[in-house]
Structure formats: C-alpha cells, structure tokens
Amino acid sequence: MAFNGSLLRLKITPTGGSTPLLVSEETKVSFGAKKETFETTNKDSGPWRKRISSFKSGEIQCEAFINYTAASGHLTYAQLWAMYNGTVSVACAFTTGVTGDFGFTGNFHLTDFNSSGETETGATVSFTLTSDGDVTGAANT
C-alpha cells in the first residue's frame, strides 16, 4: 500500500551523542544501495558474460531548510557541520518510525555538505551520507 512520503525521515545520532535526532526542517530524503560486481567471463562461459557480486555501499541524501536553533529532538545546522568536519561515522536510520514498516540503519560518514540561499526563499542545506560497514534493512519494532 502506498503511503505519504512525509512519513520517511532521517534520524542521526550526532558525534558524541547517544540519542537519535531528526533532521530539523527536512524537505527531502532518499536512500540508495549499490552493489559492485566484477567480471569472471572465461572461455567456458559461452556467449554470456559472467559476474560475481563484490562490494556494497549505501548512500543517504537529504535536503532541509537551515535552522540554527532547532527544536528539542532535532539536529542543528552546527551539528551537521560538526559531523562533516569530524572523522568518525554516525549512526543513521532511514525509516517511517511506524511499527512493521521497513527501514534501513547503519553507520555513515557525512561526505558532502552544501548550503545555498536565493533571494526571498529559505536558505537550505543538502548533504550526503555514505555507509561505513553494513547497512541493515528490517521491519521497525
């Protein structure tokens, strides 16, 4: 059954934190997974190429309005910058938070950080998180 995309949220446990926080003023979030392969075609393969699975990675992209004073339970702009500037991965969850719905969790590095503002519109931040180790997909409990 289809559901409203507004339910999909990104929660990040900031560097040095213990509680997952929502991204404040989030407007768009996406998760993607990629699997690399390498070719093993040989003289016994016939006309079809053969491949073996190799490395896997996950990526989360998020856009939000910049908020310097986020509400309780939400990440601030400064916390996002600290994660980008840091050297350790952070725990992330991409989920609706609804029991039984499928979501993804894992540790990620904030690898891309962009801020922009146009005349008479809200200033925005966009960032990319790249997986560090396993990404787990499971139903919310």
Image: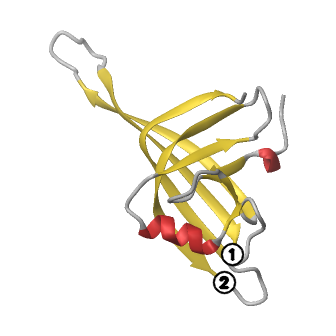
Figure check: 55 above or below 52: below
Towards the viewer: 132 or 17: 17
Mark 2 touching mark 1, by CB under 8 A? Answer: yes
Residue 117 tag number: 2
Instruction: Look at the numbered disc 1 and give the secondary structure of its residue.
Output: loop
Q: Residue 44: percent from the left, percent from the top?
A: 18, 9
Question: Which residue corresponds to mark 1?
Answer: 66
Q: Earlier in the sequence, mark 2 or mark 1?
A: 1
Label 1 is placed on what type of residue? Ile
Determine whether, in the image, residue 104 is placed left or right of residue 140.
left
Q: Residue 141 is drawn in which quadrant?
A: top right
Whole-percent x, y for residue 52 in the image = 31, 22
Say which element carries label 2.
loop
Q: Is residue 104 above or below residue 75?
A: above
Q: Position of residue 131 (x, y in %)?
A: 45, 46
**Is 93 left or right of 9, judged from the image as shown?**
left
* Identity of the residue drawn at 57% across and 47% down: 92
Mark 2–mark 1 Cα distance, whole angstroms, equals 9 Å
Foreground disc of the pair 2, 1: 1
